[in-house]
């Protein structure tokens, strides 16, 4: 036996003094390789602890649905699509005790797209209604000026949709004041309309005030607007019913569907 040799009893004593077990390992240490055994995760399938980041499929779903969220600009009901994308994104971005999960970047991009398209989809109808309302207000004001200056034949043309209007070079005064009885009758009936008479009586210098905000809505697939003007001189009101149609050149065209003196809508308080 050499000087450096030790007996088994001495080796055991040395391990005990160093806090090692019979295998020469510290208590609690794992040399069995279990820390590197693939583990099953709910979202990522098999992964290796401390070496492979978990995979969040919900992040990629969020990105895909976020791209589809462009449909939110078609109407308010489609806002449910970006909402779904945001839900999946929040699931993907939940806290994790492991390394940064794969899919969180995709989730952030998906949430950004969903929020962007969602905001556009929410405000786009409002902006469209506001634009059409301003156009309807301007168009109806010009229409009042035409009637006040006693140009009923021009007003008749503006009451037609774009398909039935004459060309700009058409001499309308000669056409309606000609010998055709039907044309003259149409002109007289138009002049005798209560709202038209009121506008002519007040004259071109009359002040007309917008009585209420322009109402813009869609009915039977056609954009419509209702404009109510009030004469500052006598508080009498006229009511425009207008339509907005797209011509073959993809240009919007307003026309006055009906003009009448304003009438309060009578609604029964209850139905027996």
Image (cartoon, grey):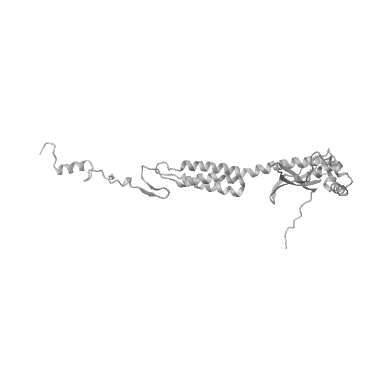
State the residue lying farthest toward the top. Answer: 3
Q: Residue 60: percent from the left, percent from the top?
A: 48, 45
What is the x, y in percent for residue 162? 75, 44
Q: Residue at x 75, y 40 (%)?
A: 138
Residue 269 location, quadrant: bottom right
State the residue lying farthest toward the bottom: 272
Residue pictured at 46% horizontal, 42% vertical: 104
Q: Is residue 83 visible?
A: yes
Closer to the camera in the image, 29 or 170: 170
How many numbered markers are drawn?
A: 0
Residue 48 horizontal side relative to residue 270, left or right: left
Which residue is rendered at x = 51% and y = 41% of the image? 109
Q: Is residue 201 visible?
A: no
Image quadrant where one finds the C terminus: bottom right
Where is residue 130? Give x, y as percent: 68, 42
Q: Is residue 173 left or right of residue 117?
A: right
Left or right of residue 32: residue 47: right
Which image quadrant for residue 141? top right
Specify the quadrant that holds the N terminus: top left
The residue furthest left is 1
Left-right relation of 264 to 64: right
């Amino acid at each position: 036996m050499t000087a450096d040799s030790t007996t088994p009893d001495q080796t055991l004593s040395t391990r005990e003094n160093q806090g090692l077990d019979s295998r020469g390992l510290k208590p609690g240490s794992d040399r069995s390789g279990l820390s590197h055994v693939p583990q099953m995760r709910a979202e990522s399938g098999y992964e290796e602890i401390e070496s492979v980041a978990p995979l969040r499929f919900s992040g990629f779903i969020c990105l895909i649905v976020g791209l589809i969220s462009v449909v939110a600009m078609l109407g308010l009901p489609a806002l449910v699509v970006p909402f779904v994308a945001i839900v999946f994104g929040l699931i993907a971005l939940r806290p994790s005790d492991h390394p940064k999960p794969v899919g969180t970047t995709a989730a952030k991009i998906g949430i950004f797209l969903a929020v962007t398209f969602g905001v556009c989809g929410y405000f786009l109808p409002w902006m469209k209604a506001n634009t059409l309302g301003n156009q309807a207000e301007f168009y109806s004001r010009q229409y009042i000026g035409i009637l006040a200056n006693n140009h009923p034949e021009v007003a008749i043309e503006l009451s037609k949709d774009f398909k039935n209007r004459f060309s700009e070079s058409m001499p309308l005064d000669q056409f309606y004041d000609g010998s055709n009885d039907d044309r003259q009758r149409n002109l007289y009936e138009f002049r005798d309309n209560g709202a038209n008479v009121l506008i002519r009586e007040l004259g071109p210098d009359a002040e007309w005030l917008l009585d209420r905000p322009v109402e813009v809505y869609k009915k039977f697939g056609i954009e419509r607007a209702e404009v109510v003007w009030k004469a500052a001189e006598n508080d009498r009101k006229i009511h425009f019913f207008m339509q907005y149609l797209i011509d073959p050149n993809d240009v919007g065209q307003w026309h006055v569907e009906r003009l009448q003196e304003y009438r309060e809508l009578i609604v029964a308080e209850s139905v027996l």
